[in-house]
Image (cartoon, helix red, strand yellow):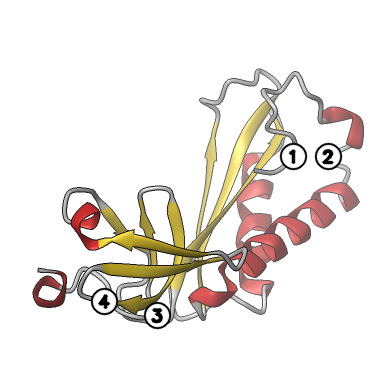
Amino acid sequence: MIVADRPYQTGDLVRMGDAYGEVVQIGLRSTKILTGSGVLVTVPNSEIMNRFTYNANAGVPECMVTATLGVPRGTDSDLLLSLGREIAVASPYTHLGHQVEVELDERGPSRRLMSLMIRAYACDHRHESRMQTDLLRRAKHEFYSLGLLKAQEVSNEDSGRGVSE
C-alpha cells in the first residue's frame, strides 16, 4: 500500500507518531527515519497505515519553517509585523520564491506576552532547524537592540514559554 499510495518518498521530511525526520529508506516491512539529532527510527509500515503521516515537503526540497517568539503585549503591532518580514527575508535559508507570513496571537496563557509567528520556506528541508535558529537569533537581536525586549521581561511565570519556543 505504501508503494502504491506513495504518501512519502525517500528524502521527505515526515512526522510519523513521535518520529520526525528525513525518510532515508522505505522497505516492504518498515520505513527508516533519520531525526534531526541523528537517531535512526524504524517505523513498521503496518503502524503507518493506521496513523496519520505528516509530510513537510512532499517530494520537493523546500519546507515551511515556523519560528515563534513571545513579545510584550502593547508593543507596536505594525513594527513587529514589519520586523518579522524583514527577519525572514534576510535569512540565508529562506526560499524567496515562496510567501513569508507573519502573525500576532494574543490568545496565549501569558498576560504579559503575545506570540509573534514567522513562517517562511527553507530552500532545503535539511536546513529546517538551522533556519528556525537563525530566525529566532535575528529576531531576538533586533528586538533587544530596539529595546522591545529586556532580559528581565522573560520569566518562568510565563508558562515556561520564555522569549522563544
Residue designated by label 3: 11
Residue designated by label 2: 149
Mark 3 or mark 4: whose residue is earlier in sequence: 3
Mark 2 or mark 4: whose residue is earlier in sequence: 4
Residue designated by label 4: 27
129 or 81: which is nearer to us? 129
Callout 1, which amino acid? Answer: Val
User: Residue shown at 65%/43% (left/top)?
Assistant: 165
154 to 82, vertically: above or below: above
Residue designated by label 1: 163
User: Residue shown at 78%/23% (left/top)?
Assistant: 156
Callout 4, which amino acid? Answer: Gly
143 or 47: which is nearer to us? 47
| Camera-side mark, 1 or 2 | 1
Callout 2, which amino acid? Answer: Leu
Q: Helix or strand or loop: what does disc 3 sit on? A: loop
The spot of residue 133 in percent (x, y) is 70, 61
- Spatial CA span between label 1 and label 3: 32 Å
Disc 1: CA contacts within 10 A as few (<14), some (14-19) or many (>=20) = many
83 to 123, vertically: above or below: above
Mark 1 or mark 3: whose residue is earlier in sequence: 3
19 or 145: which is nearer to us? 19
Answer yes or no: is residue 16 visible.
Answer: yes
The spot of residue 32 in percent (x, y) is 39, 70
- Spatial CA span between label 1 and label 2: 9 Å
Mark 3 or mark 2: whose residue is earlier in sequence: 3
